Amino acid sequence: MVRPYALIGGRTRPTGDALDVIAMIIAVRGTSFDPADLEPEHLSALRLSSLPISVADLAADLDLPLGVVQILLSDLRERSLITIHHPIPPARLPDPQILKEVVDGLRRL
Amino acid sequence: MAYAASDDRAGVPVSIKILIAGGFGVGKTTLVGSVTEIRPLRTEEPLTEPGRHVDVLDGVERKSTTTVALDFGRITIRKNLVVYLFGTPGQERFWFMWDELARGALGAVILADTRRLADCFPSVDYFEKHHVPFVLAVNCFDGARRYNPDAVRSAVDLDTDVPVVLCDARQPTSGRDVLIALVEHAIATIRRSNELSEEVPTH
């Protein structure tokens, strides 16, 4: 249990806005960084987010607690290495048909 | 700006969050597992804040965090449209993490067992208070008395518009139908609140 918190320097809360478990993370392409500045877990998170991936999926894939992953992601955001897309509140979805599509999709299960 | 925002999201999946709540051992894991593959997801939370239930740590080196496991499932509806299910921990002492999970959720399924109906009351109170749409799904365990949904509604003192559905959490089609009932209820709730906000101009 020590290792994840050593990784994030004993921090228990990320900086900046709260990061929703279903926020989508995408690595910014073509950015350069100093690998020595990052931990292996940061690099794994970057690799996994080359395609859009949710915070929860990242935590499951990395086998790290959610809180640790949220802090790793805030580190990457500070270095402008990832883009974070916050989820749209259901009442403000641009297309209300999306929820109908969810119902239809569930019926096909 | 609206155009910029939508362009910005091009290719980013729309993610929708549904919570599965209810008392300990009521079948939350079974329900998530019946509709999708469960992935392990854990969170570690500090135990130090006041007001929480105190863990008995006598004789144990003081532990500053506790690990909470969540049942996490994902249903891909189509490309770029994904539903995420989160089974919330049943014990009250883990409720501090509900706020984070409930924010922005489309809604919640509260599972109930008629033999221990009171176990669902805290979840009902929570989602009512936070205005999160929910359905009450009565898990019909073998040997449990079958109740009329209206009798359950009355016993739990639910608003008339909250759907009460009977289910068997072990059956994929049953779990799926509960989720459909929830999404349809959420659609109706959103529509009603949009109509209200159109009728009553806010100044």
Image: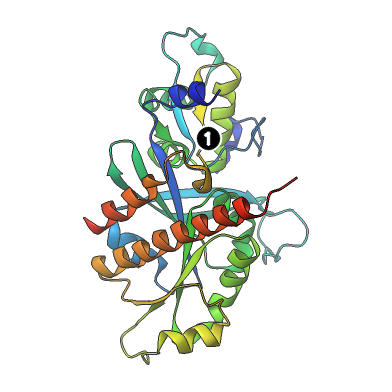
| Residue lying at the far right of the rendered structure | B50
The residue positioned farthest toward the left in the image shown: A108
Residue A104 visible within the image? yes
Q: How many marks?
A: 1
What type is the residue that disc 1 sits on?
His
Q: Is residue A82 above or below residue B28?
A: above
Q: Residue at x 48, y 49 (%)?
A: B42
Task: Left or right? Give the position of B135 relative to B196.
Answer: left
**A91 or B140, which lies in front?**
A91
Front one among B120 and B178: B178
Return the x and y of residue B38 as percentages of the image width and height: 34, 54
User: What is the basis of the colouring in this image?
Assistant: rainbow
As drawn, A36 above or below A88: above
A83 left or right, relative to B198: left
Answer whether residue B87 is visible to the viewer in this image. Answer: no
Residue in view at x 40 percent, y 89 percent: B148
Whole-percent x, y for residue A81 in the image: 51, 17
User: Which residue is located at x 40 percent, y 33 percent?
Assistant: A53
Subunit under mark 1? A
Q: Residues within 10 Å of mark 1 (few under 14, many from 20)?
A: some
Relative to B166, residue B183 above or below: above
- Name the residue tied to disc 1: A86
Residue A66 x %, y %: 52, 42
In front of the other: B133 or B113 = B133
Tell me where residue A11 sits by quadrant: top right
- Determine the secondary structure under disc 1: loop
Residue A61 image-quadrant placement = top left
Residue B88 drawn at (x, y percent): 50, 60
